[in-house]
Image: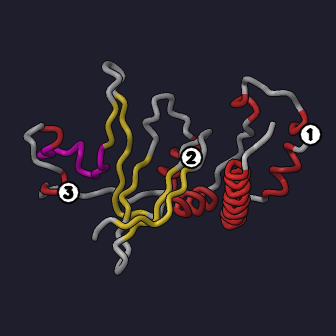
Amino acid sequence: MDYSKDEFTQLQRRVTELEHENRLLKERLEEAGISYADIASDHATELNEAYDPDQGARIRRFEVTDKVAYSFFMMFCRGRKDVYDLRYTNPKTGRVGYYTQCSNFWKQGCHKKAKDKVRCKDCELRAYKPLSVSTIKAHLQGDDPNGNDVVATYPMLIEPENTVDYGYLRPNQRIKLHKRRTLLG
């Protein structure tokens, strides 16, 4: 296959970008206490195998410790730790939404339960649940078949640049990395 000079230049640029991303991801693994060498040596024999249509079956599960869960999650999701949302899938309708977690949701007087259209941020009973290690572990393990263990955090604005530094991840999916993005101005 013959490539034009522009196509070849684009391919070279893409290889350089991928090599840079690879270095960053290896650094992130090291920061989280996960050895890339161990992962690579386990899969070295699989590299020469033919394409496997059931790629998910080859994913090696590992125990998510409290330290790994917190470090790994916070490495990508540098949001507020004093409040978070959880995904909820209605089993009857299949509708999906994210709901702010409040310690007073099940108590009498909760506006959300009364459906009187008072938003949580305006509620006098508001008591947001802080993000806990057990919630992070449930998110990373992803055991709920409906995805009701998916955590959404609120990004924090970084002053004075008015930017956010954010990423998100789900088990068995690619990690989505986002560089700082300007929100205002």
Does residue 159 lie above or below 41 as drawn?
below
Dot 3: element: loop
Q: Residue at x 13, y 44 (%)?
A: 111
Q: Nearer the viewer, mark 3 or mark 2?
A: 2
Does residue 144 lie above or below 8 as drawn?
above
Q: Is residue 143 left or right of residue 162?
A: right
149 or 45, nearer to the observer = 45
Which one is earlier in the sequence, the residue at label 3 or at label 2? 3
| Gap between marks 2 and 1 measured at Cα | 27 Å
Which one is earlier in the sequence, the residue at label 3 or at label 1? 1
**Which residue is the site of mark 2?**
140
| Gap between marks 3 and 1 measured at Cα | 54 Å
Q: Residues within 10 Å of mark 3 (few under 14, many from 20)?
A: some
| Residue 113: x %, y % from top left | 17, 38
For this orientation, the residue located farthest to the top is 92
| Span of residues in magenta | 99-111
| Residue 127: x %, y % from top left | 24, 58
**Which residue is the site of mark 3?**
126
Image quarter where the N terminus lies is top right
Q: Is residue 41 left or right of residue 130?
A: right
Which one is earlier in the sequence, the residue at label 2 or at label 1? 1
Q: Amino acid at mark 2?
A: Leu
Q: Residue at x 37, y 30 (%)?
A: 89
Q: Residues within 10 Å of mark 1 (few under 14, many from 20)?
A: few
Q: Amino acid at mark 3?
A: Arg
Q: Amino acid at mark 1?
A: Thr
Residue 45: give its label. 1
Q: Residue at x 31, y 20 (%)?
A: 93
